[in-house]
Image: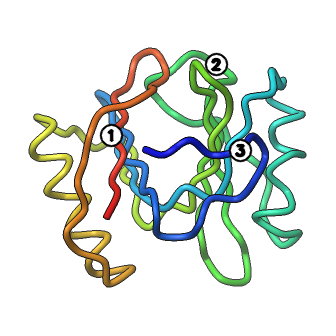
Amino acid sequence: MGDLPASEPAATGTTYVLQFGDRHVFVGPLLARTADPLTSEQAQQWARPWIGDTTIDWEAHPLDGPPGSGWATMDFLSGEQFMLHCYPDGWRLVRALSRGDGVTVESDTEACAWADRVVKVKDNVTGLHWSPGPTPDGVTTWYGTA
């Protein structure tokens, strides 16, 4: 994963984030990240320019992390889903192409194969190279780049 300037949008489709734990999985393009030490409420406000004003209220997510470490919302007009998570080096905002709450992934290989299928179907992107990177406690995060 290339270094991104703090609080700047990532080029859509350049970096995909795959996060999974004991009871959830999601994948999608990284929209933005910040290294600023923000509270959950501040992070939600920070994310607003990238997700717009037609989203429903934030709901706590993930099921596997500490309270306040992850949030999900959905645009009620388009149906797009967004994931906002606190990582050791700051917050990341991802447009979820697919997510499964209550889903168990058995291995890194299975998770990456699932993510490859989702990205191919939803974004028509193939040939991603997945590698582990910064991750919150209690989950696994891989980053896919072309």
Q: CA distance from mark 1 to mark 3?
A: 20 Å
Observer-side mark, 1 or 3, equals 3
Q: Which of the marked residues, 1 or 2, is nearer the chain's N terminus?
A: 2
Quarter occupied by residue 74: bottom right
Q: Secondary structure at mark 3?
A: loop
The disc at residue 5 is 3
Kind of residue at badge 3: Pro
Residue type at mark 1 is: Trp
Residue type pointed to by label 2: Pro
- What residue is rendered at 76% in x and 53% in y? 8
Few, some or many C-alpha atoms within 10 Å of disc 3 (few <14, some 14-19, many ≥20)? Answer: few
Of the numbered discs 1 and 3, the one sitting upstream in the chain is: 3
Task: Tell me the tag on residue 67.
Answer: 2
Q: Disc 1 marks which residue?
A: 142
* Residue at the (36%, 45%) spot, across then down: 143
- Graded by Cα atoms within 10 Å as few (under 14), some (14 to 19) or many (20 or more), the crowding at tag 2 reads few
Q: Residues within 10 Å of mark 1 (few under 14, many from 20)?
A: many
